[in-house]
Amino acid sequence: MTAQEILSNIGQFSDFDTALFEKLTSRRVLEKNEIILKEAEVCQSIYYIVSGSFFQYQNKDISEIIIDLHLQGEWMYNHESLVGQTPSKTIVKAFSKAEVIELTLENFHFLSSKAQSFLQFGKILNPTQSRTYIFDNSLSPSEKYDYIKKAKPLLAQVFPIKMIASYLKIAPETLSRVRAQY
């Protein structure tokens, strides 16, 4: 995937903007289960997922609580840590072998100072609407699953039921019953 293709999903960027973006980003390949952001580490970058998938989770006692699931073609970062420059409360880990394009916060600020078009990144730097919709609207398990099927249709094909259930804050058995209705 080219820088032009990635940027075109955000807005309109000139050839100069695209060249600057390419110069200030780096590609990284991560193996399955490789951690890209550790708990208590301050998030210093945003990542575009070229291939693969990731999950954000918190360790609670002996279990992993899934906070977010990320797929190919999405931007990924820990919002609270990045914006507040505070230690991350979550861990971001590769669910599968993956390739990302990394844009450091320092380079993002530089890009924004050189070209106003990079202010369009505000679209991706706002907290995700889907989690707010799912958890602020007291949706039933069926409505939650229906929403993610529409918002992120590939989620159910990439991640196991147990992880999706944790993400939706419902029991895996409940999710299995809901999925059986489809």
Image (spheres, helix red, strand yellow):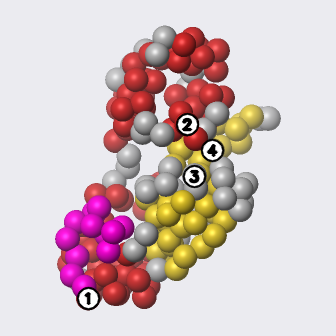
The amino acid type found where label 1 is placed reads Phe
| Range of residues picked out in magenta | 4-15
Please give the name of the residue rendered at 40% of the width and 23% of the height, measured from the top-left corner.
146
Please give the name of the residue rendered at 54% of the width and 60% of the height, measured from the top-left corner.
51
In front of the other: 176 or 61: 176
First reached walking from the N terminus: tag 1 or tag 3: 1
Residue 118 percent coordinates (x, y)? 27, 74
Dot label at residue 53 = 3
Q: Around disc 1, counting alpha carbons within 10 Å, would you say few (fewer than 14), some (14 to 19), or many (20 or more)?
A: few
Secondary structure, mark 4, is strand
Q: Around disc 3, counting alpha carbons within 10 Å, would you say few (fewer than 14), some (14 to 19), or many (20 or more)?
A: many
The amino acid type found where label 4 is placed reads Tyr
Q: Which residue is mark 1?
A: 16
Where residue 153 sits, quadrant-wise, is top left
Q: Nearer the viewer, mark 3 or mark 2?
A: 2
Q: Which residue is mark 2?
A: 157
The amino acid type found where label 2 is placed reads Gln
First reached walking from the N terminus: tag 2 or tag 1: 1
Q: CA distance from mark 3 to mark 2?
A: 11 Å
Which residue is most to the right?
A: 62
First reached walking from the N terminus: tag 4 or tag 1: 1
66 up-or-down from 178: above or below: below
Dot label at residue 57 = 4
- In the rendered structure, are the residues bearing label 4 and label 3 in contact, judged by CB atoms less than 8 Å apart? no
Residue 4 percent coordinates (x, y)? 32, 74
- In the rendered structure, are the residues bearing label 4 and label 2 in contact, judged by CB atoms less than 8 Å apart? no
